[in-house]
Image: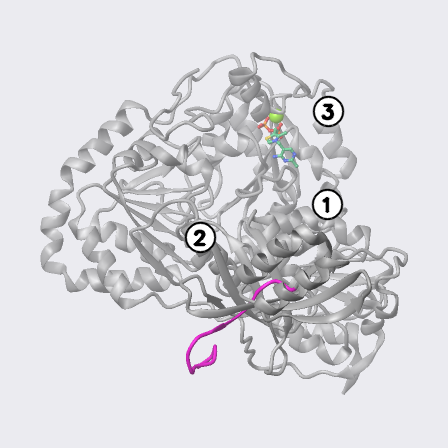
Amino acid sequence: MKMNGARIMLECLKKEGVDTVFGYPGGTVINLYDELFNFKEIHHIMPRHEQAGTHAADGYARATGKVGVAIATSGPGATNTITGIATAYMDSIPMVIITGQVPTALIGNDAFQEVDIIGITRPCTKHSFLIRNVKDIALTMKKAFYIARSGRPGPVLVDFPKDIQMAHGEFHYPETVDIRGYKPNLSGHPRQVDKAVAMILDSRRPVMYVGGGAVLGDAAEPLTLLARKLSLPVTTTLMGLGSFPESDELSLGMLGMHGAYCANMAMSNSDLIIAIGARFDDRVTGKLSTFAPHAKIIHIDVDPTSIKKNVRVDLPIVGDVKDVLVKMINQADNSNDKLAGFTAALSPWHADITAWKEKHPLDYKQSSTVIKPQFVIQKLRELSNEDAIISTDVGQHQMWTAQFFKFNKPRTLLTSGGLGTMGYGLPAAMGAQAAFPNRQVITICGDGGIQMNIQEMATLVQNRLPVKIVILNNNFLGMVRQWQELFFDKRYSSTCNELPIDYIKLADAYGAKGFLASKPGEVESVIKQGFKENGPVIMEFKIAREEKVLPMVPAGASLNEMVLNA
Amino acid sequence: MQHTISVIVENDFGVLSRVATLFSGRGFNIESLSVAPTNEDGLSRMTIVTRGDEQILEQINKQLNKLIDVLKVLDFSDGSAVERELALIKVSAEDTARAEVLRIVDIFRAKIIDVTPKSYTIEATGNPLKIDAILELLRPLGLKEVVRTGSVAIGRGAKGWNG
Ligand SMILES: Cc1ncc(C[n+]2csc(CCOP(=O)(O)OP(=O)(O)O)c2C)c(N)n1
Ligand SMILES: [Mg+2]
């Protein structure tokens, strides 16, 4: 059956199992939207800004593990998606972004609303395609989805000119796809795996250092199994939170700049670091020359470029982290006779770790007069459902969430780690809520970042997406203010928001509900009231204004040089 | 350390800019780059001469391999390849200098491909060091214009890049 290119595109999405897309119409996608009008299999959500639409697709992808899909028109619509694409790229999130483009005959002529979006996004996409013929749509989309979700996932942009949407062709979706230049190596080399297990059994101060790759690779289960089997302490990066239950004895929590003291001390004193889907980011390693000076390093990652990029590696294993971990468990089973001796030999190490945990636990001074942000986070954990999905914005509140929420399940924390994008929290929560209408979805934001995509309140209300918005209001761009306090003599240059905003009225204006807590005693009741509502809600907490995120490894310092109280 | 890398790529729209973006975005340096289609359908070959320590070269290699349009990266750093470059050189040549130019051209087995009463245009091929050497000798006579292709390289031995 012949159909137009716009319809072919939608049929492709259906074949890929896409049930929800986030998009914003305009001149060069009007044909696509015309087809969407009667296309019942795909639920379309219109954000109020294309950046938010892209973040929503990203939140949808992080929460589900499926490929998120965003649509934007050419020119300004396309450029508005860039921050969303770069955010997804830095955190390896599978996404397909479809942008309208001016008709092929006009490309390169500075036509109305023409931009070279492929050129602009080249450094922040995994790959991109310009569709030049209606015959190519199906194969291009097959490739786009395959590239987005396989290997190290990432965003793929498809530029879709208007005349191709209007041209007619046959629809045949290919069953398989073969890209000769793209063959991700998923299977961990058995000999390397055996060596890894041998190195672990030889070690006396091992640490598992786990990153977002373990979440993206759905490896939480084998990871937890292996850690428990071998009694290995586990620390995660911000992106790795949820891959290993923080309620477990073996959990050290998050490491790095605002990580737990015990986690950073364990890394600094370790004799073997087993890095799993992590990339030795500068926020994690601190000063590179003094990073983990006594440790051998095993690095497991699906992306060979991550390995030996920042640190020396003694044993690289390229492969899907889940595959490698399962093989390691099997190999450990083969060495069952040695396990008891090994775990017994770890007891001095576990004793060291317990001592560090007790010496400087993650903590804060409670107050009876002002609300401490950490207290709000703890209360949110206590009062929310076990499977609640939390998104955060970027700043102090993000770090307090990472430190105090205690994540036990993968894909329950959605946060912009690599790019650190303010404005991410609300739209990401929106995407997750669209994927899971019946789960509790909470976004934890600062008073600065919430303004960056506040317009999405309208999308929430219109689409009955009951996201619970928590604003930790310090009336500061708190994270920057903290740096100014510590390193710039308290010169608070442009970090005080000054103008107070009435968030209750704001919620009301959008047709949502707002609640405010100004004293510690009100925290619990505001959370309970907010959670009881069936629709979207703002819960504002006026918090201690100059509270700092601690402990902290100052930029450029070593991991074991943490500032514990300042 | 200087390295010569050959990259087999899909002959696709945008592939050159993907490679260039990769080098500039990651701060890798390009001393020369040449690209043209190969004998195989739909494939082009780039030769890139770059500079960096071992760790940087490993990253360059891996990052190139990661590009979807790249089929293969051949690293010729160990002298396992024959390398050639072509240069077109316009040099002033009047009076006694005319004979001097001809002598140099002869020594380097280069060719004169255009002549005027005041100049010669020379075509020289060879290892890039040889091109540097002929340019050094011609420089005192007055170089008017120099065009170099950058290196191309091919592995030694009977095997092709894909066996
Ligand atoms: C788009 C963007 N602009 C600027 C920054 C730099 N930045 C990082 S944290 C921060 C302050 C955020 O303030 P707020 O949202 O109130 O959160 P708080 O730190 O107070 O919890 C800023 C400006 C950023 N990360 N992203
Ligand atoms: Mg703030």
**Given the current orientation, which residue lies at the most extreme bottom position?**
A1
**Which mark is drawn over residue A306?**
2
- As rendered, which of A181 and A42 lies closer to the eye? A181
Q: Which residue is mark 3?
A: A502
Residue B98, given in percent of the width and then of the height, sits at 72, 62
Give the residues in magenta: B149-163
Residue at 65%, 77% in the rendered image: A139
Q: Is residue B79 above or below residue A286?
A: below
Subunit ID for the residue under disc 2: A
Residue A553 visible in the snapshot: yes
Q: Amino acid at mark 1?
A: Val
The first of marks 3 and 2 along the sequence is 2
- As rendered, which of A53 and A147 lies closer to the eye? A147
Answer yes or no: are tags 3 and 1 on the same subunit. Answer: yes
Answer yes or no: are tags 3 and 2 on the same subunit. Answer: yes
Residue at 69%, 66% in the rendered image: B122
Q: Is residue A460 rendered to the left or right of residue A247?
A: right
The mark lying in front, picked from 3 and 2, is 2
Residue A68 visible in the snapshot: no
Residue A478, given in percent of the width and then of the height, sits at 58, 24
Query: Which secondary structure class fits the magenta region best?
Result: loop
3D distance between C-alphas at marks 3 and 2: 45 Å
Q: Which residue is mark 1?
A: A461
In this picture the colour scheme is one colour
**Which mark is drawn over residue A447?**
none
Q: Amino acid at mark 3?
A: Asp
Q: Secondary structure at mark 3?
A: loop
The first of marks 1 and 2 along the sequence is 2
Q: Quadrant of ligand 1?
A: top right
Q: Amino acid at mark 2?
A: Ser
Density class for disc 2 (Cα within 10 Å; few <14, some 14-19, many ≥20) is many
